[in-house]
Image: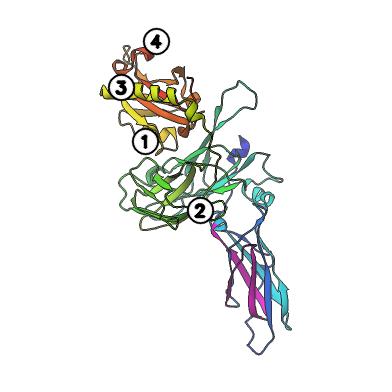
Amino acid sequence: MASHRRVHSIAGILVASAALAASALAQVPGDARPLARLHGEVFDSLRMAPVPGATVWSETAHRTAVADSLGRFVLDSVPAGRHLVSAAGPHLDALGLQIIREVEVPPDGGHVAVPLATPGLGSMFARLCRTKGEPSAGTGILFGTVRSAGNGNSIAGAAVDVSWLRIPRERGQLPFPVAARLETDSLGTYAVCGVPLDTLLQLNALAGAEGESGVVAMRIPDARLARVDLVVARPGVVGQGAVRGIVVDSTGRAIAGIALILEGTAHETRSAADGTFLLRGLPIGTRTLIVRRPGYTPHYAPLALMPSDTPFVRVEMANVRLLAPVEIRAERRNRLLDEVAQRQLSGSGRHFTAEELSRFATYTALFYSVPTLELWRGRNPSHFALRSRRATSVLGKICHLNIFVDGIKMDIEQLQSYSVDALLAVEVYDRAAQVPLQFRDTANDCGAVLAWTRAGPA
């Protein structure tokens, strides 16, 4: 786990020439001198693709341009001398990156090529992980800062817990949890190296008297680099947050009618005809925005919500091919839902339908929503047991609930090998007397959680 514990200061990363810091910019010459045209391409070396729509500007030359669909830009009428040329865009902003380059414009003007590019993955790996090379295949880097919701300041020495399920390559082996606990550096920053791609990560921050963040669910993108800033808050901190944004598909086309839900809350909305959305009155701290619609892969967007602040989020949805196994299993589905509905009518237990489950990105958030349950955490953040707050075993011990998935008894790690999206229904019984007879366990006279998956046995 040594690679997971490397922490490095990464606040305010800039891409600039080494000589820039020591050089003084020349005064802009008068209009009588020949003028030059600066041209080039804004290129993302992480995604290995141009950055369309990037904003390019030079404060010293008082010129601004917007890159075209191929990332190309032109700054006209730039006087001779040394100038700073900068570039930024939504993707770069999300990573805290801004490209800055020093350019020498000759006295006779003319055309000056100014290529603008982000550092590659190897450079970022060296900066964040303090090691040469690149992350191993199939892994990436997660980094960010921890801040206080009270004053917005970064917090040194805060604990950041990161966990995920590792899927073994060998057939027949169950996924197993992996966890890391980091400590932010003097600037409140953290970095986790070697986290797997295409795996749902859970992370949260704890900062003593400053409070803690919510549990955030996210995935490392194909670019293999992700930034998540965590905002911690004490319970009862005054203030509300908001978020606005736009939902687009992989081609950049706006999508209307997309459901957006703030995990674990009643706050939800749908994107308008132009793809835009706005959510107000949100609890402050770091939260997960869940974005869903049939035909698209569910999207999880971490939000750092501060009082009186409204961040902008651009959500890009990926299309998925819709299959038809639901029709094949329609009989099983209807039979199962009828059985769950009958037990719900009895008035005992807490029942979650597929629609209700869609509000939760993680199991911790799901079980936190049941007031009669307590999540007892082990040494690693992904290790937890479900305890009943109002029941004890016949031996007077605290009750740990049994877990059943599609009728088969499992442990909490095995349950977490299924994403919440894969569940059709969940039943929670916090006392043994409530548990349906076929799921009672004489060796454990506590309650039970019954989880039913969409692809369970017929």
Callout 4: helix, strand or loop?
Answer: loop
Number of callouts: 4
Q: Report the residue that reaches farthest toward the bottom.
A: 32
Callout 2: helix, strand or loop?
Answer: strand
Mark 1 closeness class: few <14, some 14–19, many ≥20 residues within 10 Å: few
Q: Say whether residue 352 is visible.
A: yes
> CA gap, disc 2 to disc 3?
41 Å
Q: Is 21 displayed left or right of 145 in the figure?
A: right
> CA gap, disc 4 to disc 1?
32 Å
Give how far across and how far down residue 56 sits, in percent. 59, 68
In which quarter of the view is residue 22 placed?
bottom right
Amino acid type of the residue that numbered disc 3 sits on in the rendered structure: Gln
Looking at the rendering, in which quadrant would you find the N terminus?
top right
> Which label is found at residue 450?
none
Residue 87 vs residue 399, the one in the foreground? 87
Callout 1: helix, strand or loop?
Answer: helix
Q: Which residue is mark 4?
A: 443
Q: Which residue is mark 3?
A: 342
Amino acid type of the residue that numbered disc 4 sits on in the rendered structure: Ala
Q: Which residue is mark 1?
A: 356
Give the residues drawn in magenta, as a range: 62-90
> CA gap, disc 1 to disc 3?
18 Å
- What residue appears at the point 67 percent right and 70 percent down from the top-left corner? 102
Amino acid type of the residue that numbered disc 1 sits on in the rendered structure: Glu
Vertical relation: 157 (above or below) 366: below
